[in-house]
Amino acid sequence: MRLLDGKRLSKQLLLTLKDEISKTYASSLKRPGLCVLRIGEDPASKIYVNKKIQTCNELGIQSSELHLDAGITQSELLKQIICLNQDPAIHGILIQLPLPKHLNSSSPLEAVSPLKDVDGFHPTNLGRLMIGEAELIPCTPLGIMSLLDENSIEIKGKRAVVIGRSRIVGRPISLLLDQAGATVTVVHLQTSHPEALCKEADILVAAAGKPNLVGKNHIKEGVVIVDVGIHRTDSGKLIGDVNFEEVKELASAITPVPGGVGPMTVCSLMQNTWKAFCRLENIRADDS
Ligand code: GUN
């Protein structure tokens, strides 16, 4: 069984990006700028945002965190987003999810300029993805495709099963796998006999948000497993949606948790920020 090592690949991709950013800065004195909005006090969000800001710093991307009070109103939040849309030093805007319960997430996500939407969650970017003309692709699905590609995992003609249909992962990854030539089935809470469907998969993407959901009864021998879940057990260990111990003998390749999909998500965010910057500043990616 092969481990699909996202930590190693993301390090390698980020080094290349760091080099491009520094060459562009040397010739233009311009740097990409990313603003991350964090609303309220969700502890996991704080950790994720810190990681994103730290990676920006390592790469030479100008980053800022706008931390807003949990009690902010919808209209105050929209005003902040409009300000960021107009700020020429900001090329990427990310609203860390989940939002506090009283806020509806659709309208803030739609208020972000599609040109600065480095999460790829704006309906314009999701619509482009739908018609096969993607510009900014949601970070986790983009990272998964890159991990499969770099590990020479064949997608064309394969049966792919995606567990979960969220806007962040399930829906976009099912489109990307479909566009890469897989026959895709999406399994969700209303699906009858999910195990039987999962067993048909050559590529199984687990993005259900349920610890250890996928076990040996869900898979066939030789499957490639992508585990998007990340959960902390009572003893402090990080585990995924897949019961690693149960499937490791049967799978041909699997992403570890941690060190698989997580680092690729951050890497894709940096790549999207670079892409948005190049487009907004009229810099060709190969100018540097
Ligand atoms: N919360 C969990 N995953 C994500 C993500 O990819 N982007 C944002 N903005 N929030 C998240």
Image (spheres, grey):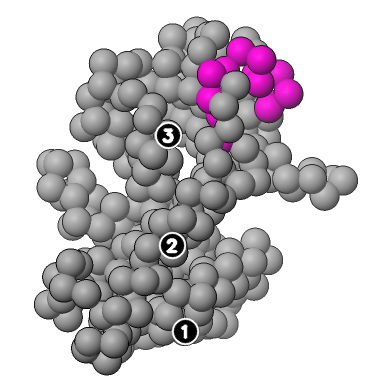
Q: How far, Cα to Cα, is label 2 from label 3?
A: 17 Å
* x then y, percent, for residue 188: 46, 27
SS at circle 1: strand
Residue 254 covered by magenta stretch: yes
Q: Residues within 10 Å of mark 3 (few under 14, many from 20)?
A: some
Q: Which residue is mark 1?
A: 64
Residue depicted at 27% across the width and 91% down the height: 29
Image height check: is 127 above or below 106? above
Mark 1 is surrounded, within 10 Å at the Cα level, by few (under 14), some (14 to 19) or many (20 or more) other residues, namely some
Q: Quadrant of the C terminus?
A: bottom left
Q: Nearer the viewer, residue 269 or 241?
A: 269
Q: Is residue 147 left or right of residue 209?
A: left
Q: Which residue is mark 2?
A: 14
Residue with the mark numbered 3: 151
Q: Position of residue 218 (x, y in %)?
A: 57, 14
Q: Secondary structure at mark 3?
A: loop
> Disc 1 and disc 2: Cα gap in Å?
19 Å
> Image point 33% across, 76% down: which residue?
21
Dot 2 falls on a residue whose secondary structure is helix
Which comes sooner in the sequence, label 3 or label 1? 1
Q: What's the magenta region?
A: 243-255
